Image: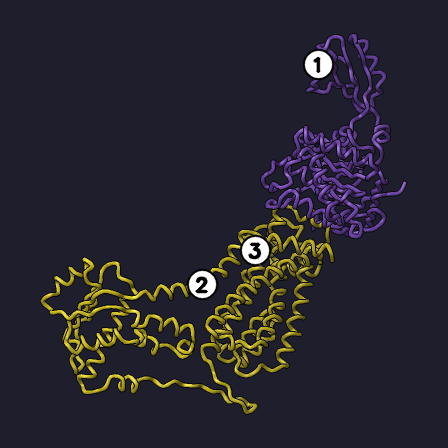
Chain colours: A purple, B yellow
Amino acid sequence: MSSALEISGVSKSFGDTKAVVQLDLDVPTGSLCGFLGPNGAGKSTTIRMLMSIIHADEGTVQVLGTSALKAKDRIGYLPEERGIYRKMKVGGFVGYIGRLKGVKGNVLRKRIDDWLERVELPDIRNRRCEELSKGMQQKVQFLAAIIHEPELIILDEPFTGLDPVNARVIGEIINELHQQGRTILFSTHVLPQAERICDRIVMIDQGRKVLDGTIASIQSQFDPRVIRIEPVDINCDLSNISGASLIPNSESKEHLLMRLDDEIDATSVLAQIVQSTPVRGIEIVKPTLDEIFIEQVTRSRGHEAAIQVRKEMSHV
Amino acid sequence: MSKTLVVAWREFRHTAMTKAFLIGALVMPLLMMGLFIVVMPLMLEANTTPLTGTVAVIAADDVFLDLQDRLSSNENPNAELIESLPDIVKNDPLASAMLTNGSMNNTDIVLQKSMPNELESLKEDVRDGALSALIVVPESLLRITYQETNEHLEVLIPSSFSPNHTDLLSSAVARTVVDVRLRRLGHVPADMHAMVKRPRVNATRLTLDGGEKVDNEAARRIIPMVFMMLLWIATFTSGNYLLTTTIEEKGNKVMEVLLSAVSPLQLLGGKILGQAGVSLIMLLMYGGAAMAGLITFALMDLIPISSLVDLAGYFTMAYFMIASIMAAVGSAVTELRDAQSLIGPIMIILIIPLALWPILSEHPNGLVATITSFTPPLIPFVMILRITASTETVALWQIVTSMVVGFGAVLGMVWACARIFRIGVLMQGKPPSFLQLLRWIKQG
């Protein structure tokens, strides 16, 4: 499969701060790739280099087989910092970006109407952007990113600030665009979001790539460390189980989660649980991206750093 | 190029086709032109309402008779004022038409000779409207030897009396007093007025090529300033728009969206081109208003066509210099107030031609003028001032050199601006220092 995005040995520093370090990235054409990492990991800097908005200090960047400068009209981009002309009318703003991307005349006008309908904003074409709610503005910005029907769509934190209903609408459109064969690079620091919609992920931390592959392949690389128990009595006492500890604040009233201690064999813990209390069900669950990422950080930067990252991500 | 034009059109449309611009930059000059073309004639028309009714006069017989003759004649009540005006105004058809408009034959009044003991009852008549006015000429004002007196001519009028009619009566009676004094001395007033009238002076410059050129002092001083101000207004207004729209695009974060569609150079080029259109409209509007004024006053012959051609050339040069500076500053800051610290020192340099105007206008081919006309970014402002102020043609080599140096500087400034722009547009936070801007030029 050919690559829509290819980055090789790319580094970028701002003064003494190394934002991206020797990053390699290969996104196959037609994939929906999550570009993940905590705040400040280097995601937006990498995306800006992909868009040729800033230039790498070293390394090569290829977008759709050429440089992003030459391929600008084939790329749709929703930046992390949302931008809009407040005094412009919605139709004027989307039309302006569309014309800059090479779409003209009636085709552009029809697309604007169709897409406004599609994002459930059919009557706002002649309203000034400043009159719209934040969520509506965000949907308009999303339209401006895709109005020219690009082959490659780069979305930097597309769901930030959207309510669940609007997030669903945008999520459905992203899926549709993916099914049409467009390549989508989707950046977020909310890992469960990516887990739900992406078919592959790239995870970076402190400017370095820490994970790259399909979700299934990544999950298979990590030893499952969480046991899901559905006891007959939810108030049962599992404090006597050695080699695992209860995960606090479990919201479910149907099941409990226990995390295995390091270097502990899961089968012995499973046996202890079954002997300790009657259960309806018990299983070793696949690690979530959150857990995989935390483990990866623990491996590369140590336990303290992992705790810090976990805190940051739980504040999202 | 097409993307640059798309940016240029948006920039032009959202600056020049807005209510604020239409009102501020277009409606105001149009109103000014309308004032000259429509309102002034209407005002002149209003001036011609005749003064009617009876005017009582308490004065000596010779004063009364002179005043009666004067008010029934066609004498211009503004004659004294006209005599005191400079030739450029006196010779102007419209100005003289305005000044001669309120002639005495616009009166249809009857003078009634009255006595000093009737003063109070006549005042009542004026208040009641039975009399149009009352004129009192104290005898002390008619003494034939000069003596300081605190007494005045009195013109008593009703509260609703027209100011023009007041002027008409005041002027007529004042001139009457002077003429009566002369007559009592045995002179013929008309002869005496002719004797004291200052002769007109023609200053003629003898040019080196053997020709003669009649000098027009007022035009020589005013027109260069007008040309320079035209350049200033047109270039700085649109330059200011360029500054604010760039800051706005940075402030509302739309810059990154734009840069995903166009390169920084395309964006900069489009913005500068779009505002060039705005600047041109300003130039045409204000220049047009000035031309309308000159045509109205029949003074168009004061501006040679070659000066308009020079204006076009130096306008282009000035615009690109100012625009590149403003775009660079706009890209480097995130708030308008931050721009002031960078614009301030630049403005001090650009204000030099204005400060030097008296010197440049007096010595348009002097050393200061010659040096500053080869010094970017002063070139366009100084050169247009020199060309229009100079009584001798500015040497062709100097015009050519200023054009070459000026447009060379434009290229350099646009290049430096582009390098600042491509770095600055993505910068947020604290504004850079001049030193940092220089570093950006080096890096960019």
- Give the residue pinned by disc 3: B339
* Mark in front: 2 vs 1: 2
The disc labelled 1 sits on which kind of residue? Lys
From this view, report whether residue B251 is shown above or below residue A231.
below
- What whole-number distance in Å separates the C-alpha atoms at marks 2 and 1? 87 Å
Across and down, in percent, residue A74 comes to: 79, 46
Which disc number belongs to residue B38? 2
Q: Chain of mark 1?
A: A
At 54% from the left edge and 90% from the top edge, which residue is drawn?
B211
Callout 2: helix, strand or loop?
A: helix
To the question of a shared chain for discs 2 and 3, the answer is yes
Callout 1: helix, strand or loop?
A: loop
Which quarter of the figure has residue B49? Answer: bottom left
To the question of a shared chain for discs 3 and 1, the answer is no
- What whole-number distance in Å separates the C-alpha atoms at marks 3 and 1? 60 Å
Binning the other alpha carbons within 10 Å of mark 3 as few (below 14), some (14 to 19) or many (20 upward) gives many
Taking the view exactly as shown, the residue that stands out farthest to the right is A1
Binning the other alpha carbons within 10 Å of mark 2 as few (below 14), some (14 to 19) or many (20 upward) gives few
Callout 3: helix, strand or loop?
A: helix
CB atoms of marks 3 and 1 within 8 Å: no
The disc labelled 3 sits on which kind of residue? Ala
Across and down, in percent, residue A296 comes to: 79, 33
From this view, report whether residue B143 is shown above or below residue A21.
below
